[in-house]
Amino acid sequence: MYHRWLIATVFGVLLSSTIPACAEDYVLTIKDNQFSPKELTIPAGQKVKITVKNLDATPAEFESYDLNREKVVGAHNEIGVFVGPLAAGNYNFFDDFHRDTTQGTLVAK
Amino acid sequence: MSLRIIALFALTITCLLQSPPAFAIDKVYSPSVTKGELETEYGGSITHDNDPDKDNIQSHEIELEYGLTDHLQLELNGTFDKQPSDPIRSSGVGFGGRYQFFEQGEYWLDSGLLLTYNRAIQKYEPDTVEAKLLMEKQTGDFLHRANIGIEQEVGRYSQGGPDRVFLWNSRYRLDKHFEPGFEIQSDFGKGSDHLGFDQQEHYIGPAMFGQIIPNLKYEAAYYVGVSKAASQGAARLLLEYEMYF
């Protein structure tokens, strides 16, 4: 019984992973330990992909408790972060390695 | 606010130490991996029951985890356990890896796989190989995690087929310091044993999760045994410190 259940779950996981992401792409840049733009507006109720480009010579960590995301961006590198669909509102994010200086807000409208 | 959280946390630790897990009650793993992150972790559990054979069973694990890539995390652990009438003893060392299948949030369900090999330290005890399917889903302010696993004894002292476990927790993301929720821990036993519900171990109970200070996270849960084979109660505590290299 458990094995059938396990196979069904694995099948479900694989099936759910075939649902296309269909995410619109937005870009966020880190330069001189500052996010640009500091406020990024995205559509509410839609999944989006944010490409975080780190133009600095030191690594950064894109982190947000509000969005439940945490990902390192190497120096002179970029990452993709999928968020949403989000309810309308403001969602704070920051660079965990420079959390005092590098902060921003995602605005879902 | 933070003083209240520290006080609540201290109270929880006190309760956990005074109150009295049987099968290896474990944390519910997230499939997410962070490259370059080194995590040092302590996880412990303890049972209580009026039956001395099910009382004060303890399990303790010290673990090191390192995110080698954006998708692969390596793990090294040492385990200690205590059976009701015995002192605490070292029981094994293990190593393994966690693989995150896709980017977090890329698909409807976040998923990954955990594979570990545990080498028994005590004589006449079997080594084990464990595989767990890790799943996570966020819905609004709620975060749900589930692990479905099998553990197979291997080597000279191995017996029978794989042991099957199911772990689940859900939490309300109220505040980064305090996320209340609940947790389920189930051990269905070995398939070849054809155990009924009451012969399996099932626990359910309240849990809380959060961050004490930046980079130091906790998880605490208290369970009630809901099958006869389970202890009347059990508790679990996890402390995790993260560093970046």
Image (cartoon, coloured by chain):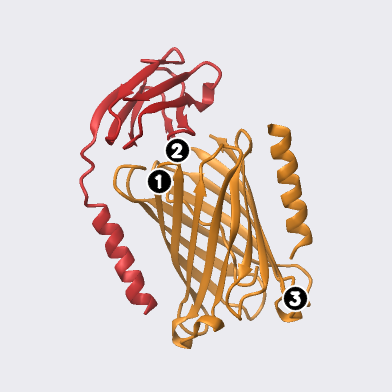
Chain colours: A red, B orange
Badge 3, how many Cα within 10 Å: few under 14, some, many 20+?
some
> Where residue B237 sits: x, y (%)?
66, 54
Kindly give the residue lying farthest to the top in the view shown.
Answer: A32
Q: Which of the chains bears the disc numbered 1?
A: B
Name the element at disc 1.
strand
Is the residue under label 2 in contact with that under label 1 (CB below 8 Å)?
yes
| Residue drawn at 51 percent across, 39 percent down | B37
- The residue under label 2 is A68
Q: Is residue B60 visible?
A: no
Q: Is residue A45 visible?
A: yes
Instruction: Identify whether B191 is placed above or below A34.
Output: below
- The residue under label 1 is B138
Q: Which of the chains bears the disc numbered 3?
A: B
Residue kind at label 3, given as amino acid type: Pro
> Where residue A24 sits: x, y (%)?
23, 31
Name the element at disc 3.
loop
| Closer to the camera in the image, A45 or B71 | A45
- Image quarter of residue B106: top left
C-alpha span from label 1 to label 2: 9 Å
Indicate which disc, 3 or 1, sits on the residue closer to the N terminus.
3
- The residue under label 3 is B84
C-alpha span from label 3 to label 2: 40 Å
- Total tally of numbered discs in the picture: 3
